Amino acid sequence: MNIEYSKILNHIQDIETKQTIKKFIDSLFVVERSGGTYCSDFLTPNEIDYCIKSINTFSSFDYKIIPNSDKCERNCILISPYVSSLDIYDYINIISTDKIDNINHRDVLGSLLALGINRSKVGDILFTDKKITIILRTSLSNYVLQNLLSISKYKVSFSLDNNFSFDDLIENTKKYFAIVSSLRLDLIISEIINYPRNKTSSLLNSGKIKVNYEEIKKSHYELKEGDIISVKGFGRFKFLNILGVTKKNKYKIEYIKYE
């Protein structure tokens, strides 16, 4: 068991991710011994993958990814010997307020963090034509409902919305195009955030850039289609496609920015 434990953790390069998975595996051991139930905090897709590998390695219990592995970016893993009989809303809640066009994802997240809430306790922030919706741990629901009364300069009124339909989601992104000389991380970062290339090294070295949710410090790291790039202070982007090559052998690329 110790060998497999080390194999999983040693494979993870990102320190924050490694700490999250270590906590999950340790909790998994406790649940396995006690025969009880455990619900993780909200996890990124790559953390979910590591956790599933850990369950398959160390546990005989069933698990469920909640609230929606197809529609949500961040999910929890619920583990129990009787997981199919559990009510997921004992562990997570969904709250919504009327949509305000000038409020975006960063506004909502900033207001939540200003309440002293740990990011890991909050899942996706979602938008439909009519709603702004937050998924969060049930233990925080009452606190957020009572205290999240404004976002930016706008008053809001959230209420419990556990019948929320994920089919109503709209993609809150904008599409952009660029021409770059290579697919190096530092070069593409410089282009998409309009930042001097000779200064992107400071962003990399200070841990402000993540690719697919893991910290990257190598400027020569080559991006692939589908990679999700986070730049602290500048937002989140997804490198969609290479559309072609110019006569000067530069790449035409397509990417989106999450609003």
Image: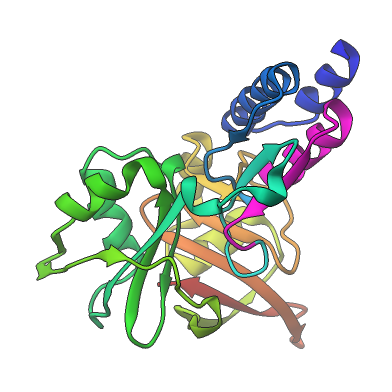
Magenta segment boundaries in residue numbering: 47-68
> In the image, what residue occupies the spot 59% across and 54% down?
186
Quadrant location of the C terminus in the rendered image: bottom left
The answer to whether 134 is drawn above or below residue 43 in the figure is: below
Q: Which one is nearer the viewer's eye here, 148 or 213?
A: 148
Q: Position of residue 120 (x, y in %)?
A: 46, 41
Is 203 placed above or below 88 here? above
Residue at 28 percent of width and 45 percent of height:
113
User: Of all residues shown, which one is farthest toward the front?
Assistant: 85
* Res. 163 in view: yes
| Residue 58 horizontal/vertical position (percent) | 84, 26
239 to the left or right of 107: right
Relative placement, left or right, of 49 versus 149 is: right
Which of the two residues, 215 or 136, is positioned nearer the viewer here? Answer: 136
Residue at the image position 80 percent from the left and 35 percent from the top: 61
Q: Position of residue 238 (x, y in %)?
A: 60, 68
Residue 246 counted in the magenta span: no
Q: Residue at x 56, y 52 (%)?
A: 87
Give the quadrant of the N terminus: top right
Quadrant of the rendered image containing residue 111 = bottom left
Q: Is residue 152 above or below residue 175?
A: above
Q: Residue furthest top?
A: 2
Count how many numbered circles sit on residues in the image. 0
Q: What's the colour scheme?
A: rainbow
Q: Is residue 113 left or right of residue 226?
A: left
**Of residues 146 and 182, the one drawn nearer to the viewer in this rendering:** 146
Q: Is residue 45 visible?
A: no
Residue sitting nearer the eye, 117 or 7: 117
Tell me which corner region of the image, top left, top right, bottom left or bottom right, holds residue 53. Answer: top right
In the displayed structure image, the side of residue 83 where residue 150 appears, left or right? left
Residue 252 point in image, percent of width and height:
68, 82
